[in-house]
């Protein structure tokens, strides 16, 4: 990544721009660039796969979803890609990953599922079980949230200080 790209990423993840009507204009102002420069570099980073998307993120509890669980699924490895893709399309799944199995914990797909109530969450898990063609899963219910924030890439605090 070029230094200007890192500066742009820092500006785009700055919380100040999320409350503005024109976030790319605000990023340009912060950087001292033109809006066209910001948009051109964002397009380039998107085409290169560095930036996947730009958008708002909701906190599930603040959006009204009171029942949240990480569901660990045991899906045959040959079906994991297909099942994971199907489950990822469900509107109440915010995260979906394939991960390695561990001794004593045979699960390979993990979905973060959000429901309005325990009953709603159970119904969604049933729908996902049908999509995955698997009834072997473990629900890891959220009891307490310690942190909910987006990752910060290239934080200034980690830069080497000039001697």
Image (tube, rainbow, N blue to C red):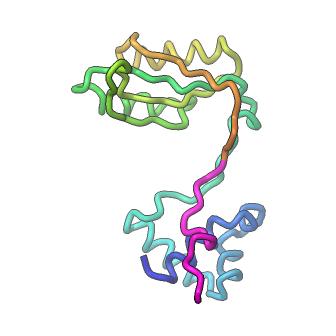
- Relative horizontal placement of residue 73, taking residue 112 as reference (left or right): left
Q: Quadrant of residue 105?
A: top left
Across and down, in percent, residue 76 comes to 26, 21
Part of the protein shown in magenta: 149-163
Q: Residue at x 35, y 15 (%)?
A: 133
- Relative horizontal placement of residue 134, taking residue 17 as reference (left or right): left
Across and down, in percent, residue 57 comes to 65, 48
Q: Residue at x 54, y 27 (%)?
A: 70
Which of the image's four quarters has the C terminus? bottom right
Q: Residue at x 59, y 82 (%)?
A: 161
Q: Count of labels shown?
A: 0
- The overriding secondary structure of the stretch rendered in magenta is loop
Residue 38 versus residue 111 in the image, above or below: below
Across and down, in percent, residue 125 comes to 52, 17
Magenta span includes 109: no
Q: Residue at x 32, y 27 (%)?
A: 101
Q: Is residue 57 visible?
A: yes
Viewer-proximal residue among 71 and 146: 146
Magenta span includes 150: yes
Q: Quadrant of residue 129?
A: top left
Across and down, in percent, residue 119 comes to 65, 11
Q: Quadrant of residue 154?
A: bottom right
């Amino acid at each position: 990544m070029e230094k200007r790209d890192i500066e742009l990423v820092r500006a785009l993840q700055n919380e100040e721009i999320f409350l503005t009507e024109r976030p790319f204009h605000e990023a340009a102002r912060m950087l001292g660039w033109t809006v066209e420069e910001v948009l051109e570099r964002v397009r380039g980073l998107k085409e290169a796969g560095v930036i996947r998307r730009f958008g708002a993120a909701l906190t599930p509890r603040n959006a009204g979803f009171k029942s949240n669980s990480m569901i660990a699924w045991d899906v045959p490895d040959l079906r994991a890609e297909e099942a994971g893709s199907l489950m990822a399309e469900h509107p109440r799944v915010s995260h979906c990953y394939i991960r390695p199995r561990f001794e004593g914990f045979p699960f390979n797909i993990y979905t973060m599922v959000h429901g309005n109530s325990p009953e709603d969450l159970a119904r969604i898990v049933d729908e996902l079980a049908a999509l995955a063609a698997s009834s072997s899963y473990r629900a890891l219910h959220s009891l307490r949230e310690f942190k909910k924030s987006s990752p910060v890439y290239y934080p200034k605090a980690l830069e080497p200080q000039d001697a």
